[in-house]
């Protein structure tokens, strides 16, 4: 058994008993069927794939990489607290952190984000609920420097599906979920209907102004943590990709 296999026998997911010595794997969603065909198994409680026994060389490609630190270099865990409509400028669509990060590193990031949040939404405190189709999802908090035209990643936050839908209100409107999103926004924040509508209107005004800028990505809090990026698109490419997918 290799040293890296031995190092992964002790679970950090809080499971006990037989699951306490799982040989955990890092399997991206796109490779789950391939890993399963080679013998990997799924732990629904830990929400992670594992090798049922040692010595399975076919699973070597999914042996885990070192954990991402709970606090990314330069990350501000207080930036963008609470629940609010957080619209991504159209010049930045379809090029979020997940699309810019290597698949295996995204799995490391996802596990770190949900783990440090205690597998609870950092805004409303809800956990996952399969029957309610509520999951835990990673959301980016960005800082926009208008003068330099730089969009900098400042924080990664764990949100439940309900809170995540609120932040992306534009997408909620397109998919017919705006009523549920507004109701959740009011429930969590205590806003009245009028206050919620004003908040959304202001968010769209800010979005309209920011969408006129070809932003340059700054993902240094990831690269400084050793996360591998796919070559991030430049500002012109991001606009082109948004237009292509919308078309």
Image (tube, rainbow, N blue to C red):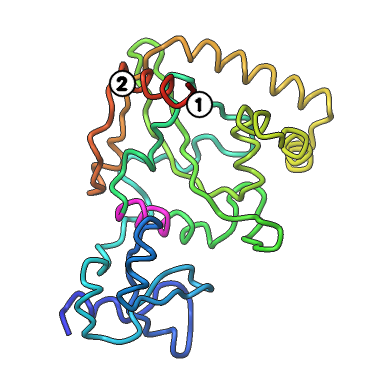
**Quadrant position of the N terminus in the picture:** bottom left
| Residue 216 pos. (x, y %) | 32, 21
Question: 82 or 210, which lies in front?
Answer: 210
Q: Quadrant of residue 27?
A: bottom left
Q: Is 200 included in the stretch rendered in magenta?
A: no
Q: Which residue is mark 1?
A: 88
Compared with 50, 136 (above or below) is above
Q: Which residue is mark 2?
A: 237
Q: How busy is the neighbourhood of tag 2: few (under 14 within 10 Å), some, or many (20 plus)?
A: some
What residue is drawn where x is 27% and y is 36%? 220
Tell me: 244 left or right of 135: left
Q: Quadrant of residue 97?
A: top left
What predominant SS class does the magenta segment belong to? helix
What residue is drawn where x is 76% and y is 27%? 196
The secondary structure type at the circle numbered 2 is helix
Compared with 77, 57 (above or below) is below
Question: 40 or 180, which lies in front?
Answer: 40
**Span colored in magenta:** 104-112
Of all residues, the one furthest to the bottom in this rendering is 17
The secondary structure type at the circle numbered 1 is loop
| Residue 117 pos. (x, y %) | 52, 57
Q: How busy is the neighbourhood of tag 1: few (under 14 within 10 Å), some, or many (20 plus)?
A: many
| Residue 18 pos. (x, y %) | 44, 89
The mark total stands at 2
What residue is drawn where x is 63% and y is 39%? 165
Q: CA distance from mark 1 to mark 2?
A: 16 Å
Tell me: 193 left or right of 5: right
| Residue 176 pos. (x, y %) | 71, 34
């Amino acid at each position: 058994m290799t040293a890296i296999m031995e190092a992964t026998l002790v679970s950090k997911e809080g499971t006990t008993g037989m699951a306490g010595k799982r040989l955990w794997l890092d399997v991206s969603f796109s490779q789950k069927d391939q890993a399963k065909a080679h013998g990997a198994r799924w732990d629904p409680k830990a929400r992670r794939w594992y090798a049922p026994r040692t010595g399975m060389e076919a699973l070597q490609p999914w042996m885990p990489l070192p954990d991402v630190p709970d606090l990314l270099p330069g990350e501000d865990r207080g930036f963008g607290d609470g629940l609010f409509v957080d619209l991504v400028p159209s010049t930045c669509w379809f090029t979020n952190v997940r699309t810019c990060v290597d698949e295996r590193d995204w799995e490391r990031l996802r596990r770190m984000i949900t783990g440090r949040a205690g597998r609870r939404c950092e805004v409303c405190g809800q956990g996952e609920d399969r029957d309610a189709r509520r999951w835990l999802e990673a959301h980016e908090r960005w800082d926009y420097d208008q003068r330099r035209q730089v969009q900098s990643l400042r924080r990664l936050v764990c949100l439940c599906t309900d809170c995540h839908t609120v932040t992306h209100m534009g997408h909620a409107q397109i998919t017919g979920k705006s009523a549920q999103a507004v109701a959740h926004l009011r429930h969590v924040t205590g806003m009245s209907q009028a206050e919620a509508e004003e908040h959304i209107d202001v968010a769209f005004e800010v979005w309209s102004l920011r969408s006129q800028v070809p932003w340059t990505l700054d993902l240094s809090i990831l690269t400084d943590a050793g996360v591998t990026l796919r070559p991030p698109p430049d500002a012109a490419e991001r606009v082109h990709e948004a237009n292509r997918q919308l078309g």
